Image (spheres, helix red, strand yellow):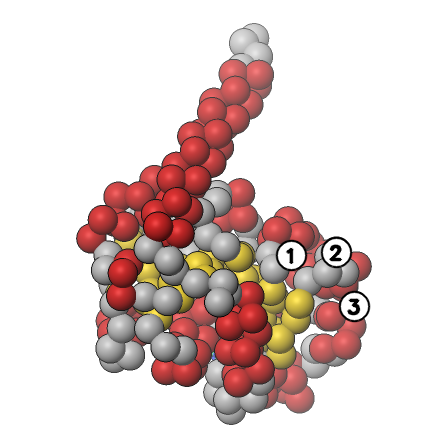
Amino acid sequence: MVDDAPKRIEIQDRILKENEELAEENKNLYRGHDIKGVFNLIGSPGAGKTSLLESIIPRLEKAGIIEGDIATARDAERVHALSVPVLQINTMGACHLDANMLAQVLPDFPLPEVNYLFIENVGNLVCPTGYDLGEDHKVVVLSLPEGEDKAAKYPAIFRASTLCVLNKLDLEPHCGVDVELLEEDIRDVNPDLDICRVSCESGQGIDELVEKLKQLSRR
Ligand SMILES: Nc1nc2c(ncn2[C@@H]2O[C@H](COP(=O)(O)OP(=O)(O)OP(=O)(O)O)[C@@H](O)[C@H]2O)c(=O)[nH]1
Ligand SMILES: [Mg+2]
């Protein structure tokens, strides 16, 4: 019997190390263009990442969007209506964006035209967490119908993020989720995590979220 476990760990370490080096290069590129804030949006499929972009981008001066999806340009087509620079990355099956994918497309993105860059990661609460893209902040997007227990069950992204957006607040009466309990679980995992309660449907909390994003950005 061949035990190949140590080799697999070595390869994984190398991949992550290479990713970190490229993420640093991406970071230098963002800073070189004086971008105030780069946000990596991470959340399950359907949590409302694209809907959030549709809600917040019109309230921010000079924003840009990089969309990450396994397939299709549907999210890029949706946000195209916002009249800001948009670029779609298709990962062709990969469950997360990595720094190299960003490095490949950044030369084609009009970085000098944006103050705020939003990267919508592939819908997934797990895999994108380990891959730094050179962003300033990870923002975890969680929607109420996903349930109260997600921070306890998927703690890594809640530890790695600066901000948690709790979306679909309008559904609270319908999905039997106790928001206080949900936030308690989040604070157990990461007491320092800022939480913004919002509804893209009703617009509740969106102004406060935009203020928070501005605060997190370099002035
Ligand atoms: N009721 C309600 N529905 C919402 C809200 N925000 C988003 N939705 C709906 O949820 C669905 C998924 O929203 P998206 O914005 O496409 O979610 P996403 O996270 O971008 O999904 P992926 O890109 O596939 O990972 C859509 O039908 C939205 O209209 C909200 O605040 N309340
Ligand atoms: Mg989306």
Is residue 75 shown left or right of residue 17?
Answer: left
Q: Is residue 22 at least partly visible in the picture?
A: yes
- Residue on which the image places disc 1: 158
Q: Is residue 104 above or below residue 146?
A: above
Distance from disc 2 to disc 3, alpha carbons, whole Å, reads: 9 Å
Work out which quarter of the rendered image holds the N terminus and state it: top right
Mark 1 vs mark 3: which is more N-terminal? 1
What element does badge 1 sit on?
helix
Q: Amino acid at mark 2?
A: Val
Mark 1 vs mark 2: which is more N-terminal? 1
What element does badge 3 sit on?
helix
Q: Amino acid at mark 1?
A: Phe
- Residue on which the image places disc 3: 184
- Residue on which the image places disc 2: 189
Please state the horizontal and vertical placement of residue 124, each as a whole percent of the image: 49, 55
- Residue shown at 53% from the left, 85% from the top: 207
Seen from the viewer's position, the closer of residues 56 and 92 is 56
